[in-house]
Image (cartoon, rainbow, N blue to C red):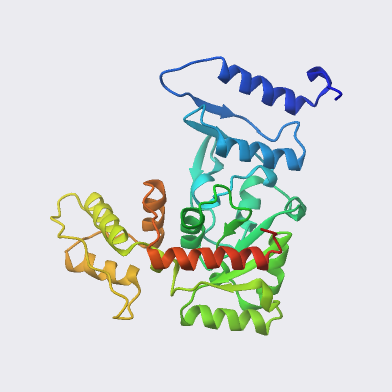
Amino acid sequence: MAVTPIDERSAGLRMYVALTAFLERRSLDVKPLLLIDEAETHLHLDAQADLVSSFMRQRQVAKIIYTTHSPACLPPDLGTSVRAVIPNPGNPIESTLENSFWRNSTGFTPLMIAMGAGAAAFSTARYVVLAEGATEMLLLPSLIRAATGIDDLPYQVAPGLSESAPENYIGLDLEGAHVAFLVDGDEGGNRLATKLDEVGVPIQQVVQLDAAMVEHVLDPSVYAREYRNLLAEWNPHLTVGDPLQLTVESGTPWPRQLEDWAGAQGASRRPGKRDMATYLVENGTAQPSAVGRVALVKLHDQLLAALLISN
């Protein structure tokens, strides 16, 4: 078998091998942080995706922080892993790290703006799940991985479907090369699915969650306990009671039950859906219930089918 000398390989590959060898030769008691500026440099699109996959699998460093202007170099969990660096127009040497750049638009549009990337950059082989809101973007990747045992999902979840005008739905297929539309299992999700059908979105691209909303696939005791913990953090002078026993019989969504309970506790600050989703993922406590696992495995299979991804 022919062997190509390393100095004849691409600059990007040589940089990657050098970095891996550098880390492998050092035995450190405390794992280092790895900082990379413009990680996509000298790498074609497929190689950028491979690089990010290797970042997710590696165990040699504690954390990797990298900058990029390339959509192909994005991490799989967009909701928890991406920060936009926003320059201060009044001071060119200052910038702000922005977490909530998804707020005012749908799909990848705000991310393209934040990255300075052109729309054509997103026409590469990308699998996108457009969900109703940011909560799905934050929670679903972790929950689906926990339910299926799959380390790397072949698609990314973007938010904002419920915030877009119906006439814009059909144009959302430009947000990625392969798109599935995910709606909740409640009445709002039913209405949204009907609107998608009315404007001509192919029915095979629309997937409905087998639960009223993504929070309802969580382990209810863990969800209530973590809500109580965050409520106590936000209201340090408040004596917070035992966690609420969440029920489905009342017909009231769990996030609303918890917010009402927090109000009854006298809390001046009450975590919302997005706050809780972030808290659960960052603390590694986004755990599905037994029923939720079944719903999530089914959802994953349906998304693969909608995106034409082979198992």
Could you tell me which quadrant the C terminus lies in?
Answer: bottom right
- Extreme residue toward the front, this view: 1
**Residue at image coords 67%, 68%:** 306
| Residue 106 visible to an observer of this rendering | no
Quadrant of the rendered image containing residue 28: top left
Residue at x-position 54% and y-position 27%: 34
Q: Quadrant of residue 214?
A: bottom left
Residue 169 appears left or right of 45: left
Q: Position of residue 299 (x, y in %)?
A: 54, 67
Quadrant that contains the N terminus = top right
188 above or below 105? below
**In the image shown, does 133 or 302 lie closer to the viewer?**
302
Q: Nearer the viewer, residue 248 or 198?
A: 248
Q: For the view shown, which residue lies furthest in the left direction?
A: 239
Q: Give coordinates of residue 154: x percent, y percent.
A: 63, 53
The residue sitting at the right extreme is 2
Residue 265 on image: x %, y %: 17, 64
**Relative to 52, does residue 176 appear above or below in the rendering?**
below
